[in-house]
Amino acid sequence: MNLAKKVASTAQYDIFARVPKEFGTVIRHGEVLATAMNGGWEFFTAGSAMSYALEYDEDPIAAFDRCIKNGHAVHWINQNATVISADKPEARRAYVIAVGMMVIFEGRQFEIVREANRNLGLKFIGFVGVL
């Protein structure tokens, strides 16, 4: 069963659209996300404090608590930098997102929202599977 369909390609990315689940499209920490913006594709990376901590052998609960205590986001989307280079990189996967789209990220449902300076953000909706 194919859960993602290729919808476009750029010099750096093959862009796929995932089949949405009941509560939204699943995104994962470290994944490259693509959105059509300003006549082209803009690329972002999803991140979370807990997954980052696990990736670097740190305590994920302590990382979560530190984010909450300091008023920082626990889940986020970073805009990727653009690099001009003569070298052609190997194509990587990116997954389509759009403003207003519902996504599931680590058991939580978010809405993709527009933020200042052509950035995107995650607006918390609720926990998936919790009434």
Image (cartoon, rainbow, N blue to C red):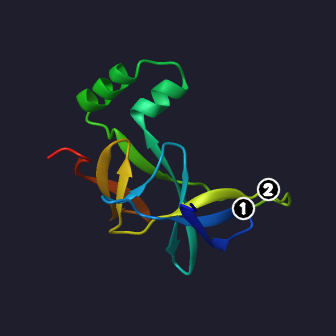
Which residue type does callout 1 highlight?
Gln
Disc 1 crowd rating (10 Å Cα; few below 14, some 14-19, many 20+) is few
Q: Is residue 10 toward the left or the right of residue 80 in the image? A: right
Quadrant in which residue 113 is drawn:
bottom left
The three-letter amino acid code for the residue at tag 2 is: Pro
Looking at the image, is 74 positioned above or below residue 38? above
Query: Is any part of residue 15 visible from this angle?
Result: yes
Identify the residue at horizontal 40%, vertical 33% (top origin). Answer: 49
In the depicted view, which residue is nearer to us: 101 or 119? 101
Q: Quadrant of residue 42?
A: bottom right
Question: Can residue 115 be seen by looking at this rendering?
Answer: no
User: In the image, 102: left or right of 30?
Assistant: left
Left/right placement of residue 50 relative to residue 94 reads: left
From the top left corner, tell me how far across and down residue 44 is, in percent. 52, 56
Q: Residue at x 54, y 44 (%)?
A: 30
Looking at the image, which residue is at 55% across and 49% down? Answer: 31
The x and y percentages for residue 62 are 34, 20
- Residue position for label 2: 89
Q: Is residue 100 above or below residue 59?
A: below
Tell which circle, 1 or 2, labels the residue nearer the N-terminal end: 1
Q: Residue furthest front?
A: 1
Dot 2 falls on a residue whose secondary structure is loop
Q: Position of residue 77 (x, y in %)?
A: 44, 51
Q: Which residue is mark 1?
A: 12
Disc 1 on helix, strand or loop? loop
